[in-house]
Image (cartoon, rainbow, N blue to C red):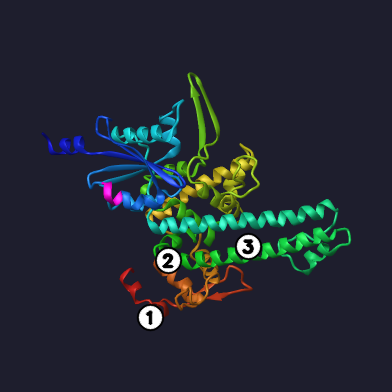
């Protein structure tokens, strides 16, 4: 008998149905016959059970859900292959009127044996860590927004006028001591102010860490290409990189657009062929990087990066105006976002400079990046040296000595010889 066929017939196909406090494990053979009866295992005992029962030839599948990555890390060195299933697509394949943990586990195991599991990409540890940080930051920003809105709502309820602005200085908090407010309401506002300050402090800590990470491996090289693009900043750049993970897993920019959920859906039946709204399937945080909370066209909001690009780059301004002649402005801004993702794919895949910006404009983008980092975060480089360092890595601006986009505020750049003395490894990349 063929060795590969023998291994396939003798292999076990196991599935873990993961819940918050326990998992259900079951296994079948190549023909779908049960070889491991479903068993419920508390998570406190799971690691020991896996070490004792998982065989080196096993194929194992789990769904992407709570604790999935922790369990994946436990399984990966024990089994021959570990697959993480897309839970949405698995449910579409395995629709059942009777649904129990045991049935779900056996169905998942049989799908694995039949090679029908819609798998997802497993991000490496550094990508997961970045995603966790970004997710926590978004959560804190959302809580901060809720707190501020709650304070504003109280002012509106009592018809108290207060100056608009995000900063809660003396000018913007005087209304909180108005006689129209009861003692209880003043106390609530005092608590909300303390909550707001605490959330802002925690958010800033995460932001500072993300800024440091942007100039460290493995993110620094990719950030070098993203930071040159219109509309991109440190947070949006790191968010895009966290969502993408590895650009090499996308064959072309269309795959990346589909992954973002910004591509329009299609409804086709017979002679009917009607376009639909964007699919919103894929990484939600990738859409967040290009969306803010005001858009009628899509629930995630107006395209933040695209809006910045439209304001800062004449090329994207012209494209936006052209699109607005054919569609609503919110649809146009989403279309701009898709084109920006195409640009992201090109610069990350082909490792090239953005052609529509001059070397001086790109240098200014790198200078703004340096402003967000302390000298320690810049590894001892001055802002001028930091800017020159990335220009040299990108291979542009050799003759550029000064940034003078605004003639009133000219900024000198460090020389290449100065940076080479500090970073001799650049000689090998020239």
Residue 409 position, x and y percent, is 61, 74
Please tell me whether residue 80 belongs to the stretch shown in magenta: no
Q: CA distance from mark 3 to mark 1?
A: 42 Å
Mark 1 falls on what kind of element?
A: helix
Magenta span of residues: 50-54
Of callouts 3 and 1, which one flags the residue occurring earlier in the amino acid sequence? 3
Q: What residue is disc 1 on?
A: 421
Residue 285 position, x and y percent, is 52, 50
Mark 2 falls on what kind of element?
A: loop
Cβ atoms under marks 1 and 2 closer than 8 Å: no
Residue at 60 percent across and 51 percent down: it is 307
Q: CA distance from mark 3 to mark 2?
A: 41 Å
The correct choice, above or below, for 248 with respect to 163 in the image is: above
Seen from this angle, which residue lies furthest right?
179
Q: Which mark is residue 199?
A: 3
User: In the figure, is residue 406 to the left or right of 65?
Assistant: right
Crowding at mark 3 (Cα within 10 Å: few <14, some 14-19, many 20+): many
Q: Answer yes or no: is residue 121 visible.
A: yes
Q: Which mark is residue 396?
A: 2
Of callouts 3 and 2, which one flags the residue occurring earlier in the amino acid sequence? 3
Crowding at mark 2 (Cα within 10 Å: few <14, some 14-19, many 20+): some
Residue 332 position, x and y percent, is 59, 42
Residue at 48 percent across and 77 percent down: it is 376
């Amino acid at each position: 008998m063929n060795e590969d066929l023998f291994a396939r017939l003798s292999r076990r196909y196991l599935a873990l149905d993961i819940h918050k406090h326990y998992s259900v494990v079951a296994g079948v053979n190549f023909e779908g016959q049960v070889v491991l009866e479903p068993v419920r295992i508390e998570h406190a005992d799971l690691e020991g059970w896996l070490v004792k029962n998982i065989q080196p030839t096993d194929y194992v599948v789990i769904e992407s859900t709570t604790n999935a990555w922790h369990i994946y890390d436990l399984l990966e060195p024990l089994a021959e292959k570990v697959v993480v299933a897309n839970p949405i697509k698995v449910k579409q394949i395995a629709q059942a009127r009777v649904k129990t943990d045991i049935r779900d586990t056996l169905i998942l195991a049989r799908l694995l044996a039949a090679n029908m599991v819609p798998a997802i990409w497993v991000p490496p540890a550094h990508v997961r860590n970045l995603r966790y940080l970004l997710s926590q930051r978004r959560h804190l920003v959302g809580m901060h927004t809720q707190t501020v809105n709650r304070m504003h709502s109280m002012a509106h309820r009592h018809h108290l006028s207060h100056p608009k602005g995000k900063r809660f200085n003396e000018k913007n908090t005087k209304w909180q001591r108005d006689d129209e407010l009861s003692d209880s309401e003043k106390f609530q506002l005092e608590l909300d102010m303390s909550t707001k300050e605490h959330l802002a402090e925690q958010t800033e800590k995460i932001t500072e860490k993300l800024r440091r990470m942007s100039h460290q491996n493995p993110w620094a090289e990719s950030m070098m290409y993203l930071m040159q693009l219109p509309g991109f900043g440190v947070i949006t750049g790191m968010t895009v990189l966290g969502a993408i993970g590895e650009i090499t897993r996308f064959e072309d920019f269309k795959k990346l657009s589909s992954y973002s959920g910004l591509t329009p859906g299609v409804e086709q039946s017979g002679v009917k062929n009607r376009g639909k709204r964007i699919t919103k399937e894929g990484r939600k945080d990738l859409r967040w990087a290009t969306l803010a909370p005001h858009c009628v066209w899509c629930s995630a909001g107006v395209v933040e990066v695209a809006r910045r690009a439209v304001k800062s780059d004449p090329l994207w301004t012209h494209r936006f105006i052209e699109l607005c002649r054919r569609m609503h402005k919110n649809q146009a801004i989403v279309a701009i976002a898709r084109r920006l993702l195409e640009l992201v794919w090109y610069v990350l895949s082909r490792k090239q400079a953005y052609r529509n910006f001059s070397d001086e404009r790109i240098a200014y983008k790198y200078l703004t990046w340096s402003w967000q980092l302390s000298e320690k975060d810049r590894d001892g480089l001055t802002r001028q040296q930091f800017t020159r360092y990335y220009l040299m890595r990108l291979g542009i601006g050799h003759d550029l000595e000064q940034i003078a986009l605004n003639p009133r505020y000219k900024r000198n750049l460090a020389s290449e010889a100065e940076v080479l003395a500090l970073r001799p490894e650049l000689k090998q990349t020239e």
